[in-house]
Image (cartoon, rainbow, N blue to C red):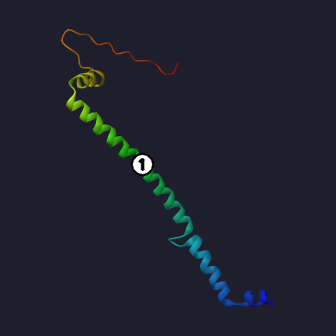
Amino acid sequence: MFNRRILRNKYFYTGLIFAVWVLFFDQESMLEQYRLSDTLSGLNNQKEYYLNEISQTEKAIKTLENDSVSLEKYAREKYYMKKSNEDIYVIVRDEDK
């Protein structure tokens, strides 16, 4: 008797249609909320990565500004700079073998 009253009630069907609409078809649906949550998580991970990279770069800049030996080492490794009486040989290793 209770089930018949619920199944014949127009408000039950209206509520059911509204719930389905909100869960799946609305602009703010649960599926959209899950997708946005996933995107937010990825962006937070990127933020942490870039903040870490910024701090490492700032440390490297401070080291290069204050230490002439490390500055010379960096210039030699990165830009292949050399003294006038030196020769530089760059060895490229093939990683496929």
Among all residues in the image, which is located at the extreme top? 85
**Which quarter of the image is occupied by the N terminus?**
bottom right
Picture coordinates of residue 73 (x, y %)?
Answer: 27, 22
Instruction: Identify the secondary structure beneath mark 1.
Output: helix
Q: In this view, does 4 lie to the left or right of 57?
A: right
Among all residues in the image, which is located at the extreme left? 84
Identify the residue at image location x=40%, y=18%: 92
Identify the residue at image location x=32%, y=41%: 55
Identify the residue at image location x=48%, y=21%: 95
Above or below residue 18? Residue 59 is: above
Residue 14, image quadrant: bottom right
Q: In this view, does 51 lie to the left or right of 8?
A: left
Picture coordinates of residue 4 (x, y %)?
Answer: 78, 89
Picture coordinates of residue 3 (x, y %)?
Answer: 78, 86
Mark 1 burial class by Cα count in 10 Å: few <14, some 14-19, many 20+: few
Among all residues in the image, which is located at the extreme right? 1
Q: In this view, does 14 lie to the left or right of 91?
A: right
How many numbered marks are there?
1
Depth check: 9 or 49 in front? 49
Above or below residue 27? Residue 63 is: above
Query: What's the residue type where badge 1 is placed?
Result: Gln
Picture coordinates of residue 59 (x, y %)?
Answer: 29, 36
Q: Is residue 52 left or right of residue 2?
A: left
Above or below residue 18? Residue 40 is: above
Q: Name the residue under label 1.
A: 46
